[in-house]
Image: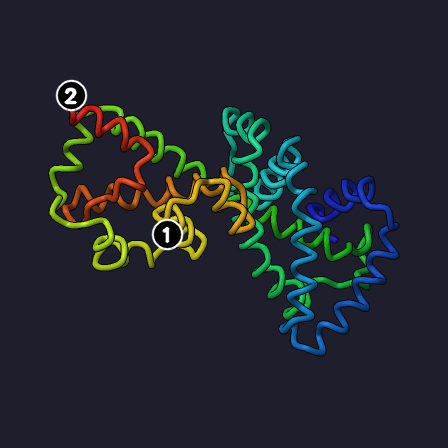
Amino acid sequence: MSDTHSMIAEALDGLLTDPRPLRIQQDAALVADLALGGFKGTEYEVFEDRLLRDSMPILRGMLRSGALITFSVQHFEKRKIPFTVSSANRQLLHGSDAERDDILVDVLMHARKSFRQKALVEGGWNPSFKGPKGSCCLLTYFIGRCLWDFRRVYLRWARQREIIAREEAALADPDAFLQVLRATPHHWEPEEILFGGHFMDLLYTQPAETQAVVRLTYEGYDDGEIAERLHSTPGAVRTRRYRFRSVLYQAAREGKIWIPRQLHVNGHRAQRRAAA
């Protein structure tokens, strides 16, 4: 068991009721059964869903307390890979359920793929490991994969927050907003843009969850309704829409598309300015 997994295992031992040896024994039997199906199919999907469900509250608590950040930073420092998290973002992730869930959803989606390949297909998880601190259960191993994936998800999240802040600042400036709109062909109808042409080209480059958020937003669903349909959170819905808005603004500045009013958070402000 690596030092990272050892830290996680010690943390989980205080949270989980079953002792570690029993968890490892049960996991070994489960993996043997899943291997018969090549780690595919309905049985594996049930296992994976349970793994994601069990890990989410643990990861949420670790991110809120800062332990997940600390473990992840230490993990990369030992490998001489630069990684820091600003104090402002630490505070934000401590205080905001929506921001925590936004990051963790992406972390889980990355980790589920790397876990299947590294831990199961390639046999990286070894219940018989004889190192000084022994082996770990599958949940510990999976959370270790989440620590590995946390870095790239966090860095993308931090960059997107900076982009969003710049775009929001630009939208607060009427002149900057008009510069975006000057490149837009106003004779086009929103439906023409949303379901054809460059808009769809841009939308198809986005993750499936983002595509669903955009479509449901245009259809008039609010953030809570969209989150319920996608089994997500309103914060994650807003962030996905904001990220796509950044893509749209760049395309609008290049004269490729017109941004439909429904995707503007500040659209009503722009309309009032135009009327004035």
Query: Residue at coordinates 51% horizontally, 38% vertically from top-left?
Result: 83
Q: Is residue 72 left or right of residue 126?
A: left
Is there CB contact under 8 Å for labels 1 and 2?
Answer: no
Query: Residue at coordinates 82% horizontally, 45% vertically from top-left?
Result: 16
- Amino acid type at mark 2: Ala
Q: Quadrant of residue 11?
A: top right
- Is residue 241 placed above or below 20 in the rendered structure? above
From the image, which quarter does the C terminus lie in? top left
Residue for badge 2: 276
Q: Residues within 10 Å of mark 1 (few under 14, many from 20)?
A: some
User: Where residue 238 sits: x, y (%)?
Assistant: 43, 39
Q: Residues within 10 Å of mark 2 (few under 14, many from 20)?
A: few
Secondary structure under badge 2? Answer: loop
User: Where residue 20 sits: x, y (%)?
Assistant: 85, 52
Q: Is residue 181 left or right of residue 137?
A: left
Secondary structure under badge 1? Answer: helix
- Is residue 39 placed above or below 174 in the rendered structure? below
User: Where residue 41 sits: x, y (%)?
Assistant: 63, 73
Query: Residue at coordinates 64% horizontally, 70% vertically from top-left?
Result: 121
Per the model, the C-alpha gap separating discs 1 and 2 is 31 Å
Residue 258: image tag: none
As drawn, the residue found furthest toward the top would be 276
Query: Residue at coordinates 70% horizontally, 63% vertically from top-left?
Result: 47
Q: Is residue 37 left or right of residue 236?
A: right
Residue for badge 1: 215
Q: Earlier in the sequence, mark 1 or mark 2?
A: 1
Q: Is residue 82 left or right of residue 266?
A: right
Is 24 in front, or is 236? 236
Q: Quadrant of residue 64?
A: top right
Q: Is residue 61 visible?
A: yes
